Image (tube, rainbow, N blue to C red):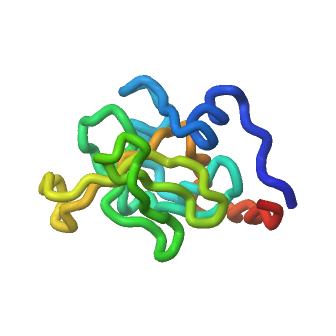
Amino acid sequence: MKKNELNPQQFHTLVEGGTEMPFSGEYDNHYEKGTYVCGWCNNPLYKSGDKFDADCGWPAFDDEIPGAVARRLDADGEREEIVCAHCGGHLGHIFEGEYFTPKNVRHCVASLALTFVPEGQPLPPVADEI
């Protein structure tokens, strides 16, 4: 299976490392139970139980599905970027030391990088052509 086709905004986010305007994303204030998968390859990234309201304008999670998210130094040389560990799609940035939750970490993720799968629905197959 190939990766999902991306619209121009998703391409800007996942491939070019962009984002959406704060407080404009589909999943910023979304709290339905389920799983958030990579919008490009369908790799499961986050469970809804790890999502919290950081009032930052983007979906925030304090944990990822083990092995789903990779970290690397951002192009700005200062922030830590998070990418899908399967396809390398840009998700957002990670911040530590803010004490929003007991885990003391915030994955700040662009809604455009995610697809939500409600609890009880099957997860889509992960793209095998990267």
- Number of residue marks: 0
Q: Quick one: which residue is furthest to the bottom in this view? A: 66
Image location (x, y in percent) of residue 66 = 47, 76
Nearest the eye: 2 or 111: 2
Residue furthest out toward the right: 1
Please provide percent x and percent y for residue 104: 18, 62
Tell me where residue 7 sits by quadrant: top right
Q: Quadrant of residue 125?
A: bottom right
Residue in the image at 68% along x and 57% along y? 42
* Residue 22 picture location, percent across and down: 37, 27
Q: Looking at the rendering, in which quadrant would you find the C terminus?
A: bottom right
Q: Out of 26 and 83, give the one closest to the viewer.
A: 83
User: Position of 100 compared to 129: left or right?
Assistant: left
Which quarter of the image is occupied by the N terminus?
bottom right
Give the camera-side residue of 70 and 39. Answer: 70
Kindly indicate the quadrant of the structure image that contains residue 35.
bottom right
Q: Is residue 49 left or right of residue 2?
A: left
Above or below for 117 versus 103: above
32 vs 25, nearest the viewer: 25
Drawn side of residue 97 relative to residue 94, left or right:
left
Residue 48 appears left or right of 42: left
Residue at figure coordinates x 31%, y 60% from the top left: 62
Residue at image point 57% right, 46% down: 114
Q: Position of residue 100 (x, y in %)?
A: 17, 53
User: Residue at the spot x=53%, y=39% of the render?
Assistant: 17
